[in-house]
């Protein structure tokens, strides 16, 4: 079951995912700088979710380098396309903010929830892969 869930391809370079996350963080920072009393908490939530996603990617890369199992570091998020389409999230988030700039707290908190769910799913998958490797086969 786990073998069907993880990617069998080589681990892609983290550059695209990092640039997509960096673009979103810059947009959130700009909105928080403009109006910290209204946008600060949502920008903080988004920054924490992006940090959690970064930690999940680091854990996946560590697990892939450890060997023995297929790499999970390059899996796109199970919730949001931050893998091969890393810039897609940034572009959609930017377009939504252009269309509705007053809605930054709502859009940023929704995006933070999606990114956090994907990061937690990636961490749970890494935990499952680690646990199944240690268990002897029957």
Image (cartoon, rainbow, N blue to C red):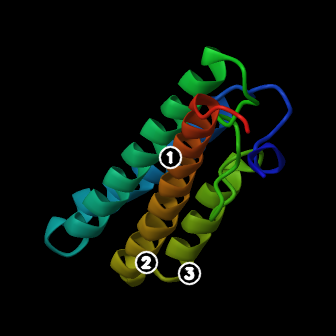
Q: Earlier in the sequence, mark 1 or mark 2?
A: 2
Q: Residue at x 45, y 75 (%)?
A: 110
- Say which of 80 and 39 sits in front: 80
Determine the residue positioned at 60% across, 16% down.
66
Label 2's element?
Answer: helix
Name the element at disc 1. Answer: helix
Q: Residue at x 39, y 81 (%)?
A: 106
The residue most toward the left is 37
Q: Is residue 38 left or right of residue 17?
A: left
Q: Which residue is mark 1?
A: 123
Around disc 2, counting alpha carbons within 10 Å, would you say few (fewer than 14), some (14 to 19), or many (20 or more)? few
Answer few, some or many: residues within 10 Å of disc 3's Cα (few below 14, many 20 plus, some between 14 and 19): few
Along the viewing direction, whichever of 25 and 31 lies nearer the viewer: 25
Residue linked to disc 3: 99
Quote the CA–CA distance across marks 3 and 2: 6 Å
Image spot of residue 104 (x, y percent): 39, 75
Q: Which residue, given by chain and number where applicable, does mark 2 sit on?
A: 101
Please state, as top left, top right, bottom left or bottom right, where the C terminus lies in the image: top right
**Residue 93 percent location from the top left of the image:** 56, 66
Picture coordinates of residue 39 (x, y %)?
25, 70
Splitting the image into 4 quarters, where does residue 99 fall?
bottom right
């Amino acid at each position: 079951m786990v073998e069907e869930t993880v990617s069998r391809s080589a681990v892609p370079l983290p550059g695209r995912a990092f640039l997509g996350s960096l673009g979103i963080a810059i947009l959130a920072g700009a909105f928080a700088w403009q109006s910290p009393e209204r946008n600060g908490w949502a920008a903080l939530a988004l920054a924490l979710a992006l940090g959690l996603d970064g930690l999940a990617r680091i854990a996946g890369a560590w697990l892939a380098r450890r060997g023995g199992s297929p790499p999970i570091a390059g899996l796109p998020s199970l919730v949001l396309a931050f893998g091969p389409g890393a810039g897609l999230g940034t572009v959609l988030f930017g377009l939504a903010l252009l269309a509705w700039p007053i809605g930054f707290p709502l859009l940023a908190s929704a995006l933070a929830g999606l990114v956090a769910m994907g990061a937690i799913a990636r961490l749970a998958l890494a935990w499952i892969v680690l646990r199944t490797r240690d268990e002897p086969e029957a």
